[in-house]
Image: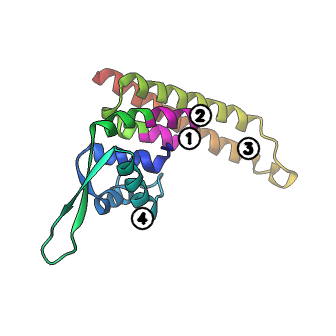
């Protein structure tokens, strides 16, 4: 199974408890990851079907009065094991801030060392981005804006680094 942010988020939300496809979609659209994870209805339902086919989820038809039946998904033992493997694959293939946020969002279902490693990697990626911005050569038209642009980028990255460091400290203190 491919490790994508959408698949990981679907499984992560279901690790919190059984839910329907609609509830999972609603969690993605309205939850804490909303600004970072844009997954449509088709991607969510496709992800749920893939997870079920892989044995990570089981589904149950729940009858509703005056409404169509709904399918409720629950994580299996294989799904719990898959969650940690997906996290490792996602970290190996995607160094984005979204990946770090996903790992942090669902940290209680992962080994602490894996979460701290994700935060360390993200901090290294952000520091590298900051160095590359400092050496950025812009066109003549943008040269006048370069100091402001570079400063704004540096401030944004610095804020993300502080966020990652604070999360690491909080996680270590909690464990």
Q: Which residue is mark 1?
A: 96
Q: Is residue 169 magenta?
A: no
Residue marked by disc 3: 147
What residue sits right under mark 2 in the picture?
126
Q: Give the x, y percent position of residue 133.
A: 71, 38
> Which residue does the numbered mark 4 point to in the structure image?
41
Horizontal arrangement in the rendering, residue 23 relative to residue 168 (left or right): left
- Range of residues picked out in magenta: 86-102
Q: Is residue 111 above or below residue 8?
A: above
Report the residue at 52% width, 41% height from top: 97
Circle on res. 65: none
Q: Residues within 10 Å of mark 1 (few under 14, many from 20)?
A: some
> Viewer-nearest of labels 2 and 3?
2
Main SS type for the magenta part? Answer: helix
Q: How many marks?
A: 4
Q: Dot 3: what SS?
A: helix
Gap in angstroms between the C-alphas marked 4 and 2: 31 Å
How far apart marks 1 and 2 lie (CA) works out to 9 Å
Single out the mark in the foreground, 3 or 1: 1
Question: Residue 138, image x and y in percent?
Answer: 81, 47
| Nearest to the observer: residue 129 or residue 42 | 42
């Amino acid at each position: 199974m491919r490790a994508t942010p959408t698949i990981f988020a679907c499984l992560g939300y279901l690790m919190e408890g059984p839910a329907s496809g609609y509830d999972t979609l609603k969690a993605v659209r309205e939850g804490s990851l909303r600004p970072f994870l844009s997954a449509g209805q088709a991607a969510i339902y496709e992800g749920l079907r893939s997870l079920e086919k892989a044995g990570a989820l089981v589904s149950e038809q729940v009858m509703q009065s005056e409404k169509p039946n709904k399918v409720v998904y629950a994580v299996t033992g294989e799904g719990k094991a898959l969650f940690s493997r997906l996290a490792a694959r996602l970290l190996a293939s995607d160094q984005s801030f979204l990946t770090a946020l996903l790992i942090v969002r669902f940290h209680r279902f992962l080994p602490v060392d894996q979460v701290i490693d994700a935060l360390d990697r993200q901090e290294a990626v952000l520091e590298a981005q900051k160095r590359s911005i400092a050496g950025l050569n812009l066109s003549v038209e943008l040269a006048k804006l370069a100091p402001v642009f570079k400063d704004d980028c540096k401030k944004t990255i610095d804020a993300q680094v502080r966020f990652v460091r604070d999360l690491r400290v909080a996680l270590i203190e909690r464990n």
